[in-house]
Amino acid sequence: MFHVRSKIRRTQVAAALVTALLSASLWSSPACAEVVQIVYTSDQHYGITRKSFRGEKKVSATKVNAAMVEAINRLPDLTLPPDGGVMAEKPVGWIDYVISTGDIANRMEGTAEKAPMTAKACFELFMTQYGRGLTVKDKEGSPAELLAVPGNHDMTNAVGFFRPMFQEKDDSAMRAMFEMSTGEKAGKDFAPYARPITFAREKDGL
């Protein structure tokens, strides 16, 4: 899995942020017996204002995402419900990965006089809040790995809306994800749409 893949439209449910745990122990083979825990989140949409959040009106996406990071950081101390599932009635304890499947940036609907937050600024804020703000650790005590998959607005702000964007094109978030996952610099000829890009790894059978 490269941190970049075409995005299927999804909705963001805050509750899912703190309960989405995937487990490799769903398979019965010994090689896949170890539990892997992943926190899944999406649609950070930095640069916009949410209509309402926790009783407040017109709340910035920055404030909403700060609350999400706090919720993720509390996960290890929570106990899973007695539902007969994997690790039922046990503390969460650790987190192996935290993944965002976009959109980190928002569509850049604006003008030169009233410019929205750029995709570059959105991704930098994401890395500040999630990259530096997350304190969850894996079983070995290392920081949980942060992964990012681009949404349509991360690939280019020209996707997904009919009005002109400002800037006309901004794929900075996509470039940043590519560089974060590969360690390679995305040059001027960077064209992710021209060829499939994948980055795969294995973790305890996943």
Image: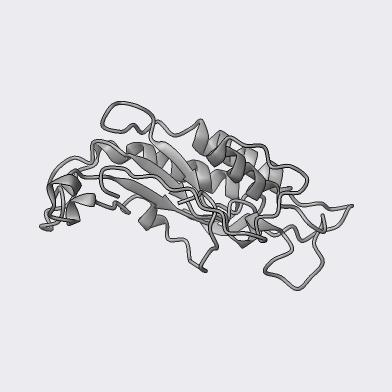
* Residue furthest to the front: 195
- Residue 105 drawn at (x, y percent): 64, 52
Between 78 and 92, which is closer to the camera in this rendering?
A: 92
Tell me how the rendering is colored. Answer: one colour
* Residue furthest to the top: 141
Between 69 and 37, which is closer to the camera in this rendering?
A: 37
* Residue furthest to the right: 113
* Residue furthest to the bottom: 162
Between 154 and 4, which is closer to the camera in this rendering?
A: 4
Residue 163, by quadrant, is bottom right
Position above or below: 93 against 199 = above
186 displayed left or right of 12: right
- Residue 107 drawn at (x, y percent): 69, 60
Number of numbered discs on residues: 0
Between 168 and 82, which is closer to the camera in this rendering?
A: 168
- Residue 12 drawn at (x, y percent): 47, 61
> Image point 13% across, 58% down: which residue?
83
> Image point 60% across, 45% down: which residue?
178
74 displayed left or right of 177: left
- Residue 202 drawn at (x, y percent): 34, 45
> Image point 48% across, 66% down: which residue?
11
Position above or below: 157 against 96 = below
184 displayed left or right of 138: right
